[in-house]
Image (tube, coloured by chain):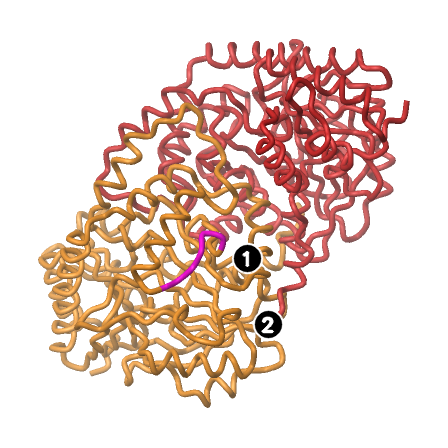
Chain colours: A red, B orange
Amino acid sequence: MPKISKKGRMMPESPIRKLVPYADEAKKKGIKVYHLNIGQPDIETPEVALNAIRNFKPKVVEYSHSAGIPSYRKKLVNYYKKHNIEITADEIIIGAGASEAILFAMQTCLDPGDEIIIPEPFYANYNGFATNAGVFVKPIFSSIETGFALPPIADFEKAITSKTKAILICNPNNPTGYLYSKEELDTLRDIVEKHDLYLISDEVYREFCYDGKKHYSAMHLKGIENNVILIDSVSKRYSACGVRIGCIISKNKEVMLTALKFAQARLSPPTFGQVAAEAAIDTPDSYFIDVLKEYLARRDVVVESINKINGAFCPEPSGAFYVVARLPIDDSDKFCRWLLEDFEYNNETVMLAPASGFYSTKGRGKDEVRISYVLNVDDLKSSMKCLEEALKVYPGKTN
Amino acid sequence: MPKISKKGRMMPESPIRKLVPYADEAKKKGIKVYHLNIGQPDIETPEVALNAIRNFKPKVVEYSHSAGIPSYRKKLVNYYKKHNIEITADEIIIGAGASEAILFAMQTCLDPGDEIIIPEPFYANYNGFATNAGVFVKPIFSSIETGFALPPIADFEKAITSKTKAILICNPNNPTGYLYSKEELDTLRDIVEKHDLYLISDEVYREFCYDGKKHYSAMHLKGIENNVILIDSVSKRYSACGVRIGCIISKNKEVMLTALKFAQARLSPPTFGQVAAEAAIDTPDSYFIDVLKEYLARRDVVVESINKINGAFCPEPSGAFYVVARLPIDDSDKFCRWLLEDFEYNNETVMLAPASGFYSTKGRGKDEVRISYVLNVDDLKSSMKCLEEALKVYPGKTN
């Protein structure tokens, strides 16, 4: 039997999915499991997007342009204009989700053996894409004490080597919900310019900003236009994760020409998803007003509930729909599994993501969990009650 | 400005797409261009697939399972049973087209620096996937004189080194249309077993077999079940290239577990495409009877027309919807460009793919072109008339 590749053996398992069998077991026992472990919102996809699919007219489902349907890219230009991001249709390549866009970015900019700096905790699949591209992730620590603000510039300087080719941020952040300030982005601008690095900015949660705070894009940074690569997706914006439509955007012509070669090799992004995503740009503003109001209420339930728990701490983030909370526990992997295997409160339990999976540095995040507030307020309240009760009886509690 | 990766610089440009600007120019001059350069059929997608999309009911377009929608994979098991391929749903991972499935296969089985043997001419994008995976393609020559039959076993033996991890075939073949016989597959079986290699078999044209010949799958080969990886796609089968749904299939559990890690990193394949592909399995047999009759008539037009041209030669392949023909020309790249830039017959011309792009060995295929017979018989007749007239006046003709 021939051997599996080293790369294949090194590919990380999804930290979120490894608990799924335990959740399935709990459900078999008749226990209701609240899923706060994944970023799959319950929010409805805008009607305008679904109707475009229901009215799909062509008789042949053809390949689209490798960079994406031209009319969709043109319409995206206007979407970005509304967010003060000035680009042309040629500066966009549509990918199968932000996932493919990030892979295109890494493969275009970094060679196997090169290093990419990412503030941790970070979106766990960055590890998978980096392994896929043969790239080493150099994490720098952002602390729950500061609400996961950008680490100090000295930490970046310390991490940069001759192998460093890029810095990757997610803003607003998954898993922390942290929204980077203009000042923090200016700091990144200076580091990127000084060392001539790529700045890959994953901004798929752009719309999800709270407390009157504004999203500041890496595309707004002056003087590093050829260094910045924007990653985007419609998955969260329109609660349309399954359409698998994202994009890579850059003003760097060489980057775009090269990314296009990767895009051409796989022929085209999904046609139906693009049709839905193009129509979704016409989603009325009222949709977002309602959605943001809903997420804000959810965030407040989660943050308040956790901070009331003895020994627990949850910063109040201003973006996305995640928090990373510190709990009085010995080991979040054990705790999250225990919640599914050995705990129930009124025949209910809650599924959380151990934060360890979002850290690249071993041992970090052991007393932290990521909570996705993707359920309605009532379900969240019940989930938080479960969590509170669980922490009273968990054998590995530390307070 | 930071540098592009070496890998990015090495990524091949699509040999089919590089002529597109010349075709666009011809069209601007009012010339009708017959597109025989790409594998985008004009055949209608089955109604049953389109209706499934038009009737899409869920209110949220959710991520599917990373390996694909369970009900779709279960239904695929029955599809393969009809083709005497016995597999379970767990032995299938759905990908974004055969493109992603091939990448998963290469990344799972081969490490950067490893070698994969492919009979040439071969589907040009295999080069892109290999470059992406850091893998070296070792071509072995199949000749137009034999109709592009499997090269002799001695040629495989000569090409195998300690770095060789896999043989990749496309059956029926793109670009040659060649359908491998049971005997040829048995030969491959023996080589694969002897050297313990992976056999990656791209069978996306399974349905397109002519002259009463039967398709014999690599999955039918006994004793190398852990070596065989089947690549498939619904793009050509249902003329649904834009849905971007394919799959990787193997009985090798380690291969599937590893491929799943790559699949999990990108979350899920496109939901809409899967819905269409699942419904497409119910396409009535009459659809394929009509489609095959149509393709057969087209093949006959192309093969007969070319063989009537002085100095030209076209084998009569028994599968897919391509031929590779030899023409009395100096250089197919020049000729195909000249057809678009400098030629018209009754204000029409034809766009072909230079076969050089399907060879990995430099200098090969210079007097060959690939023709996709994806247009109706009348258009094909007009195209062949253009080609005949062109060969009377082409400055680089060699006869």
Q: Position of residue B184 (x, y in %)?
A: 36, 81
Q: Which residues are magenta?
A: B85-90
Left or right, residue B337 beside residue B314: right
Q: Which residue reaches farthest front?
A: A29
Nearer to me, A194 or B277: B277
Tell me, yes or no, if residue A120 can be seen here: no
- The residue to which callout 1 is attached is B256
Task: Give the residue displayed 75% in from the left and 48% down from the top.
Answer: A164
Nearer to me, B351 or A339: A339
| Discs 1 and 2 share one subunit | no
**Relative height, residue A44 to residue A364 (above, below):** above
- Secondary structure at numbered mark 2: loop
Q: Position of residue B138 (x, y in %)?
A: 51, 76
- Secondary structure at numbered mark 1: helix
Quarter holding the N terminus of chain A is bottom right
Image quadrant of residue B364? bottom left
Identify the main secondary structure in magenta: loop
For marks 1 and 2, give the CA distance. 13 Å
**Circle 1 marks a residue in which chain?**
B
The three-letter amino acid code for the residue at tag 1 is Met
**Relative height, residue B153 to residue B36 (above, below):** below
Image quadrant of residue A134? bottom right
The three-letter amino acid code for the residue at tag 2 is Pro
Q: Position of residue B6 (x, y in %)?
A: 62, 59
**Relative height, residue B152 to residue A273 (above, below):** below
Left or right, residue A367 beside residue B386: right
Circle number at residue A2: 2
Q: Position of residue B185 (x, y in %)?
A: 38, 78
Nearer to me, B289 or A103: B289
Image quadrant of residue A21? top right
